[in-house]
Structures are given as structure tokens and as C-alpha cells.
Image: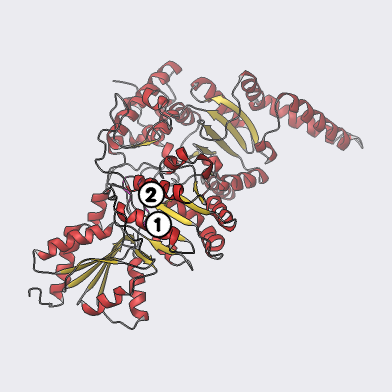
Amino acid sequence: MGFLEKIAGPEDLKPLTYAELEVLAAEIRALLVETVARTGGHLGPNLGVVELAIALHRVFDSPRDAIIWDTGHQCYVHKILTGRREAFATLRQRGGLSGYPNRSESPHDWVENSHASTSLSYALGLFEARRRKGESGKVVAVIGDGAMTGGLAYEALNQIGARKADILVILNDNAHSYAPTVGGLSTHLTRLRLDWRYQLAKKGVEWALERVPRAGPGLREGAKRLKESVKALIAPRTFFETLGLTYAGPVDGHDLRGLEEALRKAAAIRGPVLLHVATEKGKGYAPAEEDEEKLHGVGPFDVATGAPRAKAAEPSFTQIFAEALLEEFRRDPRLVAITAAMASPTGLSTVAREFPSRVYDVGIAEQHAVAFAAGLALGGLRPVVAVYSTFLQRAFDQLLLDVCLHRLPVVLAVDRAGVTGEDGPSHHGLFDLSYLRLMPGMAVAAPRDGAELALLLRSALERWDGPTALRFPKGTTQRPSLRRRRPPRPGEGEILREGRHVALVGIGKMTGTALAAASLLEREGVKATVFDARWAKPLDPTLVELAVSHPLIVTVEDNILAGGFGAGVLELLAARGVRAPVVTMGVPDRFLEHGRQEELHASLGLDPATLASHILGTLRQAGRELRP
């Protein structure tokens, strides 16, 4: 039996020797690789925090001491060490462990945080609540993997320093976030700064100087200037210290003994402390160490090589978008693109290879990305912001007041729209149709396939003079044919199939579901019209004609029903005075769990078989004659 099998909780770590902990770390890495190779997930970040997670759970008493991970995708080792080792095989599977911290899974998980840069705000709020209630326990925030580039982190740091909150911030620097130099002098200074005797002596001297009659304040100020001058010679005053935090580091995040020593000393200091820990993303697994992105987020892969198990036969929507955008870049020199630290996942790395000076990476800062795009548009350029649906939500105010208020021609390429799958509630793109549709002047398009994606991108760039959102799902699609078609005008849909018993109106990927359901209905004698709306805003007036000419109209969307596409159709019919039976199919008023797309669509009734069955039942209940 290995050491890992004996770890039922954090308390089982404390008796182990450092030699035994090294073996345990290797066993954890083997489990990470084995499991993520089968389930997919965030491999590189978790390989890099093995020793850090072990050290944190040896030094602190979770959950009495709150450990908050940011971003949450680096929490796998934390889960393994807090009683979920046996369930780890179910990672990211429906009904199994979430790929992020999850309050319903364990008291060791304080928040369901998968969006970056939130941990420091959570930590300060938790600290203040405990202080007011007289509760004990340290609050520790582990922030890294680029999360420190988000503005929210700095807003929280500012208040943490101002309130002198007793919070320990661990800056996990894996070369994808803020990175001061690592060296022997820094190690020495870290030990000095974290030593309780140094902290006590510094405060004691300041206290004594203040109390020297008359000359006290002057002596204290002079000593302070001298201290700052000497410190400037050997270690520049850090940004974090100007905010009121004691800064220490960097320390080697893979040296368990040194890491524990630094953590214990940092925990003993009263007030806000930032401990800078240098880790290696992907450590211990050669394919991850050698990969440019350290196998950050992966699908199932071959353990021996790190290569994907099966390459999709068809391209992804993201690939088609990248190719279409590259073509537009070649055609229009005004085009520029913006990513929030996700150039490769959103396809912009393809464009950047040919046009590096026209692609901007602003870090994990979606609010800035959109406001920056507004400025570019004000200057006469045509910016395209490529972003996941779930992350675009963070820039709601900038979309509304910086882009839409000025009616600027900013194009939003909204990737991972709808049901995304295994990453769970915080990553499904279920809200974009609702919040984008309410913005004045915003056109909202959703292509059903790759050919439509390329066409609608051209429409956004050529046929609309205001802001446009182009939302598309995660998954594969057919590659567009070389034959060029006329880009549809905003608000122009398309009838794909003629019928008379029911009109199925799809938006985006759900148009394909509507087509498949129509084929199933035909076997039952039901002839369905299928209409691809293409645009959630503006809506095609053809929808009014369909409502008048069909006994039933059914809208199908992979968005929350409240304020979504179906709601827009109902608003249109009401405005035109049309009273017609309408059924809206979509996501109900709840957050959606993690699982495979197909499983989740079926659970929502958004698969062809369930959709057809629901329509058939509705028609029969209404007593409609189904056969000619």
C-alpha cells in the first residue's frame, strides 16, 4: 500500500516525514495524470501545486483555517487530500466530482470559484465576518496562474492592506503570472522578513523611537528614511508593500521543507502577508513540462505521449472562426483582435501568427478588454473581442455603457455559448442571449454550423454599423464549402424545411436539433417547418407569418428561458397583436451541473427524441389532426 491510500484527510499528512512526503507527491502526480488522461481537465496547473497543497494542509487546519483557491481549477490536489481520493475517478463526470471547488462536496471547499481574481475579495469578506463574530481561524488565499492580472485582485489587495486584515495571500507564480527574480539573496531576505524576531525588533524600535521626548518623531522618521535607503540598495520596495502587505519571496514551491518553514513564519505575522511561491506548471510529467502551454486544460489523452486520444474528424467552431477571421484580417487592415489571456483557446493564436501586431492580449481582464475595444473603435479601428460566454458576463457594464451607449462597431466572438459540458455551472454559456439582447443597439447572431459562422462574421463586419455579438458553441462542425454565399442582413432568418403542423424555430446549434426532431416527427405523420432564426436580435418578421400559418410554434435555444430567444419571439408576437400558441424550450431557472453535453441536453429535453416527443404530446393534447 502506498502513502496516498492512507490519506483520508489532512490530519494524516502531519505524521509523515519529508522523505515520505516526497513519495506521496510522486503518487499524487501519477494519480493526476492517470485520471485526467481519462476524464480531461486542468492537468498542468495541478501538477505544479502538489507540494504547495501538501504544505498548506500540514501547516494549516482546514476547514477551520479557510483555504481559498484562485483560480479554482488548481484544486485537484486539495480535493485528493481532503477525503475525496476514492471519488477522484469521477472527476468532471455527471454526478461525480466537480473540476472546481464545490461547497456541496466538502466543508474544505469554501466557494465555487472558477472565474479568476475573486479569491482576495472572498478572503477579506470571510475574515471580516469571522472578526465580527469572534471566530478563530486563519484565512489563506492561493492566487495564481494569471489571476493576479485581473483588476478585481488589486481592488481587494488595496482594501486588505488598508484594513490591515490578518490574511495570508499565496502568490502561486508558475510563470503565467507576476514573476520577480528567484535567487539566493531573495531566499535570504525572505527568511529574514518572515522571522518573528525581525518583525518584533522592527516594531520595537519604532515604538521606542516614538517615545523619545521631542526628538522622537524626527528620529523615527529619520530611521525610517535610513531603513528605506538601505533596503533600496538590496531589494526594491515592492508593489505589494506599498499597499500595506508584508511581502516575502520568492520561495521554491517544490521544496517541501523550505515551503513549510516559510508558511509557518508567514502565518505567525499579524496583518496581511503576501508569500510569493515559485512553482513549475506541469512539473513531474515530461509531456506537460515540454508543452508550450504545459497541458493546461486538456481532453482525454495518451499517458505515454500526452497526445489527444482521438483527434476529431471535423473542425471545431473555434477553428472555423479563427480561419474566417484570418480571411477578414487579410481583407481589412482596420481589423484588430483582443483576448483576455486566452489566445489559443479562442482561436486568436492562428491570427496572431500572421498578424502579431494586430492581436492584443490584455491578461485576465475582461472588463478592460471590452473598454479597450471601445477605445480602438473610437479611433477608427474594427476590434473583435474573442471571449468565452461565461467570461464576457464580467464585462456587462463596459458592454452597456462603453460600447452600446456609443454605438461602436465592436464585434464580440462569444465562444463556448450554451451547454459546454464537464466544466460545470460557472462555465456554461447559458445567459448571453438574455443579457446581450437587452442592450440597445446590439445585434445578436448565433450560427447553426461552420458555414453560417463565416457568413455571419462577414455580416457583422459589413452589414451592421453598431455592436454585434456572434455566439457559437463548444464542439465540432462541418467545414464550410469554398462557394461564397451572400452574407445575410441582421435579422434575416432562413426556412430550412417546409411543413404545416408545427413550426420549429431554432437558434444556433439548436437549429440542428430542430431539424433532427422534425425528421422524427415526420415518422408520426407530423409535418414540421424548421426555421433558422440566425439572429436573436433583431428578429425576422417571418416569425409572425409562421405563427399565423401554423397551429403551434416551438422555439428551441440552449440559453436560460428568462429573457432569452423564446422570450423575444413572444415579445415580437405580442407587439404585433398575434395570439398564437407558443412553446419555448430551453434551460429552466437554475444553474446547470457538469456532465457531457449530450447528457445535459437530454436532461433538459433539448435532444431530438425528447423534443419530438414533447411536441407530439402537445399537439395530441390540443386535439390537432396530425395526418393529411
Quarter containing the N terminus: top left
Disc 2 is placed on an element classified as helix
Disc 1 crowd rating (10 Å Cα; few below 14, some 14-19, many 20+) is some
Amino acid type assigned to the residue bearing label 1 in the image:
Arg
Of all residues shown, which one is farthest toward the right?
A: 214
Q: Position of residue 136 (x, y in %)?
A: 55, 41
Residue hosting label 1 = 458
Horizontal side of 445 relative to 155 (left or right) equals left
Is residue 121 something that shows in the picture?
Answer: yes
Disc 2 crowd rating (10 Å Cα; few below 14, some 14-19, many 20+) is many
Amino acid type assigned to the residue bearing label 2 in the image:
Ala
**From what the image shows, is residue 396 above or below residue 354?**
below
Residue 47 picture quarter: top left
**Callout 2 touching callout 1 (CB < 8 Å):** yes
Disc 1 is placed on an element classified as helix
3D distance between C-alphas at marks 2 and 1: 9 Å
Is residue 267 something that shows in the picture?
Answer: no
Q: Which mark is residue 324?
A: 2
Over which residues does the magenta segment extend?
420-430
Q: Examine the residues drawn in magenta and state their main secondary structure.
A: loop
Relative to the observer, which residue lies in front, 162 or 7? 162
Q: Position of residue 524 (x, y in %)?
A: 8, 66
Horizontal side of 546 relative to 159 (left or right) equals left
Q: Position of residue 294 (x, y in %)?
A: 42, 30
Relative to the observer, which residue lies in front, 411 or 181? 411
Mark closer to the chain start, 2 or 1:
2
Q: Position of residue 221 (x, y in %)?
A: 84, 35
x 42%, y 21%: residue? 21
Colouring scheme, one of rainbow, by chain, secondary structure, one colour = secondary structure
